[in-house]
Amino acid sequence: MKTKGPVLVAFLAGMLMISEYFLDVDWLGKMATWIQKYYIIIAAFALVIGVTSLVRLHATKIRDKNKGWGFSLVTIIGLLAMMITGLGLVSQDPESNLPLRGTDHPANLWLYDHIQVPLGATMFSLLAFFIASAAYRAFRARSPEATLLLLSAIIVMLGQVPVGEAIWDGLPQVKDWLLDNINTASKRAIMMGVGLGMVSTALKIIFGIEKTYLGGGDG
Amino acid sequence: MIAVKEGVGPEFVLLMLFVVSLLYFLGQARKGVHFKIRKIAGLDAVNEAIGRATEMGRSILYSTGLEVASHIATIASLTILSRVARRAARYGTRLQVPSFDPVVMTLAQEMVRDSFLQEGRIEEFSPTDIFYLSGEQFAYTAAVEGIMVREKPSTVFLMGYFYAESLLLAETGNAIGAIQIAGSDAVTQLPFFIVSCDYTLIGEELYAASAYLSGDPIIMSSLKAQDMSKAVIWVLMIVGGVAAFAGSPFFLAWMGGIS
């Protein structure tokens, strides 16, 4: 019974969603929307569990004075600051007398614009350095395949910028040919495999062949 | 009167073909037929990677990617996590699962707990090792990178759907000298994983991983069904190509129903 119930639920929900995709039946569409709304509700409850997990993890680090506990303190302060300003607990709109929620609250907006966005941009900008180190490793001509990759990369990179056209005006065409034929063909082959893999995984779960998601698995 | 939606005919036919081949191979598996599946280096290395962490006395870090629980790549990742968790429990190796989504975290906690229970090591299960970090892409990335640098896990699994953070995570793992096994169906991120990780499961291999690791012929029957469907697609592509060259509009019009 421990697995039969969830497998039955997965089967019914899966069949409903498949039927809704192929059949033009009003009540099926409503049922599918209803199920999707339930996912949002469950996710909202799970967010509380998530935040509890986060607070517990960092509170333990602070309590035990683990290495780097100061970062945990920053995390907790940041979480509380965003939560207090975002929930509209500390100020009201003077005209409507309604609580200012989310980024409507000036402090919340300031924290978002001046802390969260720059931090995200900093992380994103690190990509440039990581791309350089990864490209160095990938483009070392150690084998015929790596040499081919290196040559293709040089053509594509030069074909993408004006200096490439200045060197040889046929370079952008070669670049386009490589991207439209070799690259697209490989990508499509991968995407077809992905599509079949998705269908296979979904059917395995719907038919109860794959029950690992219910816990355990067989090794 | 039940009406069929317009333009879904070819998809329905292909889905039915898949279901029929799945049921056929399932029947074969139940009769005891042994399927030959090609070797996937990344999955053969899973035991080695877990063993390495055990020998070095360090942890395993497993990321399920940046998608929600209803995303099929996340579901595939969770099924692999379950199998990795069983082996980690067997070897007594610490497994950390930082999560991007609270629903995924809850599911991962349950699955890992059950894996430890099945291995008879429930007392070694630590629910705090499967934790929520952030729903913000780069906040999550920074936190996972921080864990990698501070705790230096010996083995890093990056399985699921990733975006721009893929290279940030994989390069940090590479920098700390961890053995890294990645798997994703995000076509644009695959090159980054291939460059920075020791093994990469490309596209469909991510979905095949759970069946492959289980070694169970019943579950592996789905892989044979996938191969059969690939053969059908291959034939359709040839027929479609020939029909297009011959100027026949029928096949293209029929397939044109697929959006």
Image (cartoon, coloured by chain):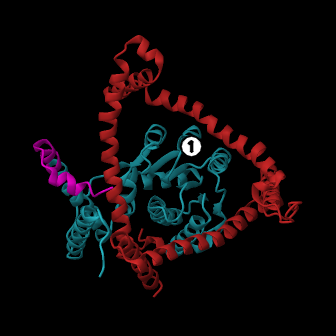
Chain colours: A red, B cyan
A23 is higher (above) or lower (below) than B76: below
Could you tell me which quadrant the C terminus of chain A lies in?
A: bottom left
Decide whether residue B254 is among the magenta residues. yes
Q: Chain of mark 1?
A: B
Q: Quadrant of residue A54?
A: bottom right
In this image, B192 relative to B247: left or right?
right
Q: Residues within 10 Å of mark 1 (few under 14, many from 20)?
A: many
Q: Is residue B31 left or right of residue B151?
A: left
Which region shows up in magenta?
Answer: B239-259
Residue B40 visible to an observer of this rendering:
no
Q: Position of residue B167 (x, y in %)?
A: 53, 40
Residue A190 in view: yes
Residue that badge 1 annotates: B173
In the image, residue B177 above or below residue A16:
above
Q: Position of residue B254 (x, y in %)?
A: 21, 57
The residue depicted at 35 percent of the width and 70 percent of the height is A204
Identity of the residue drawn at 67% across and 39% down: A121
Residue situated in front as seen by the camera: B256 or A198: B256
Measuring 78% from the left and 43% from the top, which residue is drawn there? A114
